[in-house]
Image (cartoon, helix red, strand yellow):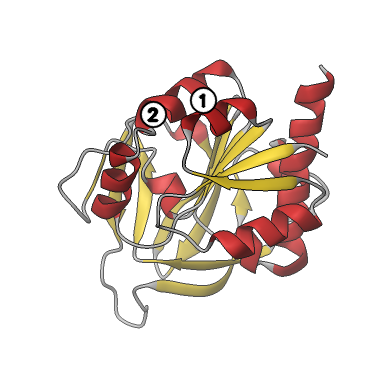
Amino acid sequence: MPIIAVVDYDMGNLHSVCKGLEKAGATPMITHAAKDLFRADAVVLPGVGAFDPAVRNLRSRGLEQPIKDIISSGKPFLGICLGLQILFESSDEGSQPGLGIIPGKVRRFRPEPGITIPHMGWNQLEFTQPKSILWEHLPVEPWVYFVHSYYVDPTDHQVQAATVTHGNQTITAAIARDNLTAVQFHPEKSSNIGLQILSNFVAQVREEIAA
């Protein structure tokens, strides 16, 4: 079974992510030690909460550079929710710089009549990279579970792997670039669709190990 490091920086529901990875056929390892991240077959960066405390916590644990090194090394990497947002350069939610791995900014939803912020509940993905490994064996426009008030706005829209529409705003729901994938929604809360996405990630990890 592939060993997947789940980054613990006090900003995520690690238990449900680990349960999802176990169901998908991996051995999750919760850790805040850089050496464990380098040793694992892949890394998952989950996250729930606010942008500034998240990047501060990562930096105080000395994890910013290891995460950058792991992504540039080609190791499979999956960010979830806040774990997507902190890969960007900055956020409307705070003043701290993000990790800057993906050029672009995290923005707040514009208020609109009749839409709720946070964007919370089930919504449909529209694939912009339909051939991404994350979407294998999924139906067209699958339903997944979101909870967020902010969304990522990449400078280069080529990294966008899926979008979602909330009110009149169509925003980035997932990114994929080489070995780096990250999603705004919660696959671990998205029932069978979410489990398939995690299984697709684990399959990618297995391929890397076999290569």
**Is residue 141 shown to the viewer in this render?**
no
Q: Which residue is mark 1?
A: 71
Give residue 25's position: percent from left, percent from top: 82, 48
Q: Nearer the viewer, residue 195 or 26?
A: 26
Q: CB under 8 Å between callouts 2 and 1?
A: yes
Circle 2 sits in a helix, a strand or a loop, which is it? loop
Q: Secondary structure at mark 1?
A: helix
| Amino acid residing under circle 1 | Ile
- Image quarter hosting the C terminus: top right
Q: Percent position (x, y) of residue 64?
A: 36, 32
- Residue that appears at 75% across and 58% down: 195
Q: Determine the residue positioned at 77% across, 46% down.
A: 26
Mark-to-mark CA distance, 2 and 1 = 9 Å
**Front tag of 2 and 1:** 1
Residue 29 horizontal/vertical position (percent): 64, 46
Name the mark on residue 180: none
Above or below, comparing residue 42 to residue 110 in the picture: above
**Residue for point 52% across, 28% down:** 35
Tell me the amino acid under the disc marked 2: Ile
Q: Which image quadrant for residue 148?
A: bottom left
Q: Seen from this angle, which residue lies furthest left?
A: 95
Residue 20 left/right relative to 184: right
Query: Dot 2, crowdedness within 10 Å: few (<14), some or many (≥20)?
Result: some
Lower sequence index among marks 2 and 1:
1
**Relative to 30, residue 97 above or below:** above
Query: Would residue 136 be found to the left or right of residue 98 on screen?
Result: right
Residue linked to disc 2: 101
Q: Going by the picture, which residue comes out furthest to the bottom? A: 114
Q: Please provide percent x and percent y for residue 112.
A: 29, 74
